[in-house]
Every structure is written in C-alpha cells, then in structure tokens.
Amino acid sequence: MATFVLVHGSWHDGTAWQPTIQHLEGRGHKASALTIAGHGKRAQKNVNHAQCTKSIVDYIVDNSLTDIVSARSQLRWHHHLQGCGNCP
C-alpha cells in the first residue's frame, strides 16, 4: 500500500485533510498531513517562502518518510514542489 503526505492550501492547516486521511487509511494506506509554517491556529504568520518549504521538508525527514505519494491542494503548489525537490 502507499504512504500519502497531504499538503493543505492557503488559509487552511493539516486538519483540512482529516476526512481524506480516514478514507485512505480505511483502504489500507498510510496517510498524514502536515501544517505548513505560518498556518493554523496561533501560528506566527510572518513567514517567508523558504520557511514554508522547509516545514514540508522537515516533516518528511523528521517522520522518516520515503517512497511517498504527495498531494496538495490549492495555491501551495510552489512550496509543495520545492519541498519535495529538497528531500533527500
């Protein structure tokens, strides 16, 4: 089965993917969603592109995720693509 890492769009956080995570896990996949730096409740909002991208890379590396299927929603495609490209 696949391992999914889900990246939210603008004005959301990782909790937006909860129904999708439940759906994927119900079919035997592993799934998780991160919250990009600067997003979510009580998050410091003054972050730049590099910090957003780094938060994606850090999530993948810190959780020792490999051979992942990464999905994103909305406008965060630039962070998503750069983040995935920076993973070891």
Image (spheres, rainbow, N blue to C red):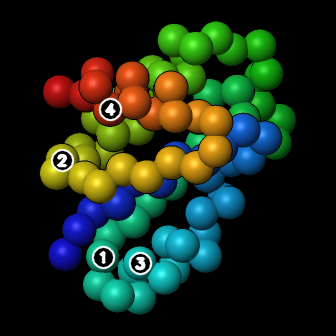
Q: In the structure shown, which secondary structural element does the residue marked by tag 3 occupy?
A: helix
Q: In the structure shown, which secondary structural element does the residue marked by tag 2 occupy?
A: loop
Q: Earlier in the sequence, mark 1 or mark 2?
A: 1
Residue 33 position within the rendered picture, expressed as x and y whole percent measured from the top left: 50, 54
Q: Is residue 62 visible?
A: no
Q: Which residue carries the number 1 mark?
A: 29
The residue lying toward the viewer, choosing from 36 and 42, is 36
**Total number of numbered discs in the rendering:** 4
Q: CA distance from mark 2 to mark 4?
A: 11 Å
Q: Which residue carries the number 2 mark?
A: 66
Q: CA distance from mark 1 to mark 4?
A: 20 Å
Kindly identify which numbered label has been placed on residue 87: none
Q: Earlier in the sequence, mark 4 or mark 3?
A: 3
Q: Amino acid at mark 3?
A: Leu
Q: Which residue carries the number 3 mark?
A: 24
Q: Earlier in the sequence, mark 3 or mark 1?
A: 3
Q: Which residue carries the number 4 mark?
A: 84
Q: Amino acid at mark 4?
A: Cys
Q: Is residue 78 visible?
A: yes
Q: Contact, CB < 8 Å: mark 3 with mark 1?
A: yes
Graded by Cα atoms within 10 Å as few (under 14), some (14 to 19) or many (20 or more), the crowding at tag 3 reads: some
